[in-house]
Amino acid sequence: MTAESTAGPAIRVQGLEKAYGELEVLRGVDFDVARGSIFALLGSNGSGKTTTIRILATLLKADAGTAVVNGFDVATRPANVRESISLTGQFAAVDGVLSGRENLVLVARLRHLKAPGAVADDLLRRFSLADAATRRASTYSGGMRRRLDIAMSLLGDPPVIFLDEPTAGLDPEGRMEVWQTVKELAGHGTTVLLTTQHLDEAEQLADRIAILHQGRIIANGTLAELKRLLPPAKAEYVEKQPTLEEVFLAIVGNDHIRHVTGTSNQGNHG
């Protein structure tokens, strides 16, 4: 990795614009993403989240503005950007006929990695999929397939990973499995840019949150900073009601938490 690629933020977007005919999808988007952090791009369907990701991943050309990923301009140095990133789309791109291990080995070989079997085994352990390694991916739960998909994205240790609505279509248990995985990515130093339309997902995961609305960033900050945008509510002495997450965890018990944090493999059988 060159000094150029390690200087400054992992991602810098300035004045990004994109239109399809008369439809303006992005209308001057600006944001920075610090290295090793989780940055959430929050917005409703059609707000421009996926378009932004596609431009950053060099899959789409912007009409105006600049975008730099890992020190490389996406327009002038796309090959360097592609070497620096991995992209996980809204649906898990795993081969259901192959086992989890075979999926990982296949991608490792395509990326010309040394010892693909050892690399696959390491990722299976890291993502709590070792017990399901030889099972067909078609038998995996939604959360397991998504974790395998993210594991495949990490082959080659890209410093930046894009997750486009990583929990789309998952049940609550699967969502929490993916949340734990994303937190572990940042813990290992990977920069994560994720898009989501779920407020709780951004709140749970992100170091910083940018709200994209009608092609513009209308707010950008930490959760605490965004909360200060609203006036404080008057304090009232009322009985505290449990959150839905607290209810769910109380019902499913501690076994699920041990599984998600990697201290138990009981949940890896579907």
Image (cartoon, grey):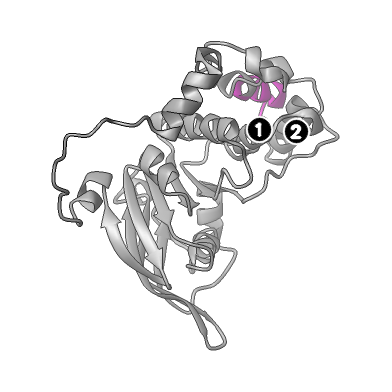
* Furthest residue in direction bottom, as rendered: 22
Where does residue 20 sit, x and y in percent of width and height? 57, 82
Where does residue 260 sit, x and y in percent of width and height? 53, 21
| Res 103 label | 2
Q: Is residue 44 left or right of residue 239?
A: right
**Region rendered in magenta:** 113-123
Q: Residue at x 49, y 69 (%)?
A: 75
Measured along the vertical axis of the image, is residue 196 above or below residue 245?
A: below
Name the foreground residue: 101 vs 259: 259
Magenta stretch: dominant secondary structure: helix
| Res 214 label | none
> How far is disc 2 from disc 1 in space, using C-alphas?
8 Å
- Kind of residue at badge 2: Asn
Determine which quarter of the picture holds residue 94: top right
User: In the rendered image, is residue 79 in sight?
Assistant: yes
Measured along the vertical axis of the image, is residue 211 above or below residue 37?
A: below
Q: Is residue 25 left or right of residue 209?
A: right
* Furthest residue in direction right, as rendered: 97
Quadrant the C terminus occupies: top right
- Kind of residue at badge 1: Leu
Q: Are marks 2 and 1 in contact (CB under 8 Å)?
A: yes
Would residue 115 be counted in the magenta stretch? Answer: yes
**Label 1, residues with CA under 10 Å away: few <14, some 14-19, many ≥20:** many
| Res 148 label | 1
